[in-house]
Image (cartoon, helix red, strand yellow):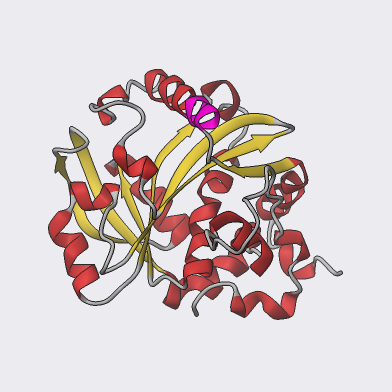
Amino acid sequence: MSDTLFTRGDFSRKILEILDNVEYRRVESGEDMEEVERLRYKAYRAHGALSLAPEGLLDDVDFDSHAYIFGLYYYGELVSTIRIHYVTPEHRISRSGEAFPEAMDELLDAGLTLIDPARFAADPEFTADMPWVPYLTLRPAIVAAAYFRADRVIQSVRPPHAAFYKRVFYADTIVPGRLAESYGVDVTLMATNVIEVGRKLLTRYPFFISSASEQRMMFSRNPNDTLPPLTIIPTARFVPPGELGTDLPL
């Protein structure tokens, strides 16, 4: 298959090459949760951000039925982790909902469904030389938006990081930076309207593209399905160009 569509700039091409050595694992076992907790501690401590987890590095939301925790592995080594939460008008539990209850309720009262990534943590020993880690760690949020046909991807971020989410994810600011009691620091609430910008996002950053099979492996909890596989291989390289428009609810 031609890679013409998938090489818009050296950066995207490089990340597509890196995908060949990357895998995701959905964290389900207690042993894996302990590994995630250790990585969160290592990352938060390195960045002086342990105050962001005043109730501990694992919380009740980690075990919610709409929460999905992933580890990102590079050459078999765990380099980062993230929790993805699927938030609906009927199921409103999320980290952003704790920090911005009024704004989140307004979105949900309008009937929107949301993907809320949280608990981003990356091993500081790797990230200095791997600028692609944030992109691929956040990739499951875009995969989730496609799988659940969500309306928005939410970002609760420190104000200095807002420019990154605006540039990469075309995120709009919903609530400007303010002190969020659940975090103990200033936080900005942002959101990507994937219905409006999904095609542009996938065209600019084709490593966010995923196949229907990858989406199911990441997020299906259908009891008729098999157990989630140990390894989930990113499929951005293998999605035919003609299927680009079906990856997000455009």
Question: Is residue 124 one of those drawn in magenta?
Answer: no
Expressed as whole percent of the image width and height from the top left, the position of residue 43 reads: 44, 24
Q: Is residue 112 above or below residue 136?
A: below
Task: Please name whichever residue, 65 or 20, is drawn nearer the observer in this view of the structure.
Answer: 65
Q: Residue furthest right?
A: 1
Which residue does the image show at 53% across and 35% down from the upper left?
A: 29
Q: Is residue 107 above or below residue 100?
A: below
Question: Is residue 31 one of those drawn in magenta?
Answer: yes
Lateral position of residue 28 relative to residue 230, left or right: left
Task: Please name whichever residue, 14 or 179, is drawn nearer the observer in this view of the structure.
Answer: 179
Expressed as whole percent of the image width and height from the top left, the position of residue 225 reads: 62, 61
Q: Quadrant of residue 111?
A: bottom left
Which residue does the image show at 72% across and 31% down from the upper left?
A: 76
Expressed as whole percent of the image width and height from the top left, the position of residue 202 reads: 59, 67
Lateral position of residue 129 relative to residue 148, left or right: right
Task: Please name whichever residue, 2 or 64, is drawn nearer the observer in this view of the structure.
Answer: 64
Expressed as whole percent of the image width and height from the top left, the position of residue 117 reads: 40, 50
Which residue does the image show at 53% across and 53% down from the upper left?
A: 140
- The span picked out in magenta is 30-36
Could you tell me what secondary structure mostly forms the magenta stretch? helix
Q: Is residue 128 above or below residue 168?
A: above
